[in-house]
Image (tube, grey):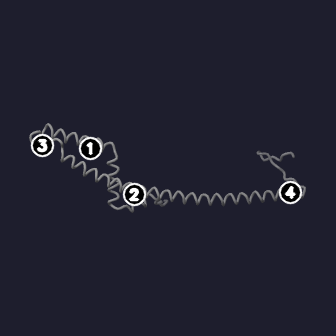
Amino acid sequence: MSERKINWHAAHKSQLSKGQRAADVMRNGMGSWPFVGSFIGFMIVWALLNSTVLAAHAWDPYPYILLNLFLSMLAGLQGAILLIAAKRQDAIAAAMAQHDYDTDLQSKAEIDRLTSINNQQLEILRELRQLAGRSGATPERTDPAGRAGDR
């Protein structure tokens, strides 16, 4: 069996604190259509309960000051959570860009090495052709099928 290599993402994810994991979960939840729909639904239910159903004994009558307080607190928390998550995403993007850059440098070095080997081989071929031309011998060429050709 082959050992499973741990990639950069798995190693990074294992180093996250509980707070960072919670920020990611909340960011993913708050940035979704189900959250938006449920949030709008909650506000409609709140308004209906306090305006019609519980009109005489509403705990938050119109203009819904308590709801406004909750929404303000939620907005403040969401802003902080989203900034934490965005900061982490920036750090991940920077690390990935550095990794890509390092990989590009390694690839360039390998390509330069292979180009150098290719140039050496071309130089050897030129020297062999010059030697063959001086001695008067012409190398026999073959066609793709491997038969000797006429020169």
Q: How far apart are marks 4 and 3 (CA)?
A: 105 Å
Q: Identify which amino acid the numbered label 2 is placed on.
A: Arg
The secondary structure type at the circle numbered 4 is helix
Q: Which picture quadrant has residue 127?
A: bottom right
Along the line of sight, the residue nearer the viewer: 60 or 129? 60
Q: Which percent across, then down, holds residue 125?
A: 79, 57
User: Badge 4: how crowded within 10 Å, few (<14), some, or many (20+)?
Assistant: few
Q: Residue 122 at x, y = what percent? A: 76, 57
Q: Position of residue 28 (x, y in %)?
A: 35, 50
Whole-angstrom CA distance, mark 2 to mark 1, is: 26 Å
Asked if labels 1 and 4 touch by Cβ distance under 8 angstroms, the answer is: no
Instruction: Name the kind of residue labelled 4 in the image.
Output: Ala
5 sits left or right of 112 in the view: left
The residue pinned by badge 1 equals 39
Of badges 3 and 2, the one in the foreground is 3
Q: Which of marks 2 and 1 is nearer the N terminus?
A: 1
- Residue underneath mark 3: 58
**Foreground tag (2 vs 4):** 2
